[in-house]
Amino acid sequence: MGVDMDLQQKARERCNWLPERELPPGPMYKALVDQLASDIASGKLLPGVRLPPQRLLADALGVTVGTITRAYREAERRGLVEARVGSGTRVKGKTEALPHFHHLTRAGQDSIDLSLSIPIPTPLRQQQLAASLQRVSSRPSAVDEALVYQPEQGCPTQRDQLCQWLESQGLQMDPEELILTEGGQHADFLALQALVKPGEAVASAALTYPGMIAAARQLGLKHLPVGTDSEGIRPDMLERLCQQQRIRLLYLMPEYNNPTGQRMSEARRSAIVEVARRHDLLLLEDGVQFVTAEYRGTPLYKLAPERALYIFSVSKLLAGGLRFGALRAPANLMAHLRVALRAQCWSSPGLMGAVTCQWLADGGADALLNWQWEEIRARQALVQEILAPYELSAHPCGFHAWLRLPEGLRAVDFVHLADGRGVTLIASEPFCVGSQPAPQAVRICVTPPASREALAEGLQRIRILLDEAPAIPAPLL
Ligand SMILES: Cc1ncc(COP(=O)(O)O)c(C=O)c1O
């Protein structure tokens, strides 16, 4: 069979990696793996880099796909690369664990950013922050209180103020049960570091918040996925997993799973608590994707106060830059949390806490939040209207919607196509636990655009791409 030189040249131009030197005689697949190993060792191929698709590399080298498949398999066996369904074969290596937050890169200036889960931009926020700063700085006793070293659980006045505000939102907590943190991510990390030993296992939905995946990895924990249905984590699957191995902690978002939007019924919450009691699991409920009281079910710490922790943060409500949050925990775990927090940062910053709690106590925050909830409802309605024919999962006051792509579309390609049309989205990949295959879905955040009109424009562009789907040429493999 003659080699089509034109096809080979085109394929070579599209390959991001090719063996530079003439390969030595002997089995081709082995020579390829040796070349790969040498390029990885020399730093020419960095960890995380995706290798060319098999068919493309086969065309570029004028060999059969079978040869490349064999080479990639051998490279995987030797621990050089890692293959993942839906995202190809990538160079393995330590830094490969780092890019879990890679999606937090800002969208280009002209792009409509639908990738970040953040509060809706409004000048009201700046005005309220200025007022809050002013009030704290004009009270010498408040400044004094904020400027001293704080106890590990955080300033007692701030814990009282926070509890009062949480109570107004239907979440009753005792200030003694709270440890103040530098936001939700810190609370996640703190809970894992203080309560789970390296090598022990934690579990969560197979698609979950990437910060949790990153924290578990960083701490050397085993992170196991649990199967879900339309209500989130399935108790029978959790039961089976617990029978197979010891799980220390289950991480979950019963109100509104980030990213899939599943919400747990009351019956489901009780069933999960039952399994947790049977197998002595800690429950870490992440409430950072905060919803209004009218949509909230019973928090797990109410159902199982002896084993459930709850994470709160103002990042989605006031501003992510405040780095202010809290972790509610049963009294018998508080000493472990205090010791871990002291080792990390002594305490959460008193000044940030003072400004944030003043903001919450003023009533200004409530006005801002009421505006934001109304705006989010209107924006979620726009998503439902513009993307009506497609498979969406969302919450009326959620910060994002989850879009399952129609047959034939791949999430990574879709994100790329959307980028070409000036819309920034996130594919499913960063949300996958372990080596779970990534579903062909994308997350659409409704809050970053400054106006509903900008959001509608972004959604229209997505709609056009979806409608055009059958015309999108399949990528050359
Ligand atoms: C579920 C969840 N938990 C925690 C966080 C991190 O919260 P923070 O920004 O307060 O650290 C986020 C942020 O997006 C989140 O979605």
Image (cartoon, rainbow, N blue to C red):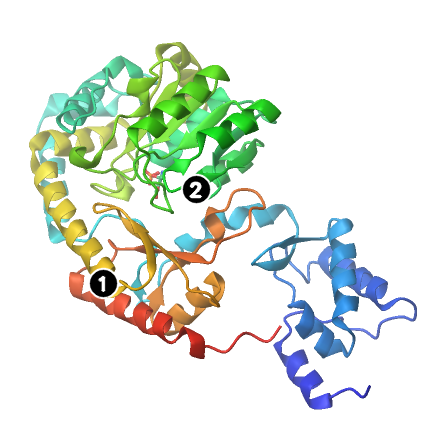
Closest to the observer, 158 or 432: 432
At label 1, the amino acid type is Leu
Could you tell whether 115 is left or right of 170 in the image? right
Mark 2: give few (<14), some (14-19) or many (20+) Cα within 10 Å: many
Using the numbered discs, state the Cα–Cα distance from disc 1 to disc 2 in whole angstroms: 25 Å
Where does residue 147 sit, x and y in percent of width and height?
24, 25
At label 2, the amino acid type is Thr
First along the sequence among labels 1 and 2: 2
Where does residue 240 sit, x and y in percent of width and height?
55, 28
Could you tell whether 77 is left or right of 409 in the image? right
Could you tell whether 103 is left or right of 245 in the image? left
Closest to the observer, 334 or 258: 258
Q: Residue placed at 33% from the left, 67% from the top?
A: 423
Mark 1: give few (<14), some (14-19) or many (20+) Cα within 10 Å: many
* 274 relative to 85, above or below: above
Displayed quadrant of residue 330? top left
The image quadrant in which ligand 1 is located: top left
Read off the residue under disc 2.
Answer: 208
Mark 2 residue element: loop
Q: Give the mark count.
A: 2
Residue occupying the far top of the picture: 332
* 436 relative to 387, above or below: above
Where does residue 344 sit, x and y in percent of width and height?
44, 26
Callouts 1 and 2 close, C-beta under 8 Å: no
Q: Residue placed at 32% from the left, 74% from the top?
A: 464
Mark 1 residue element: helix
* 440 relative to 53, above or below: above
Where does residue 474 sit, x and y in percent of width and height?
53, 75
Read off the residue under disc 1.
Answer: 455
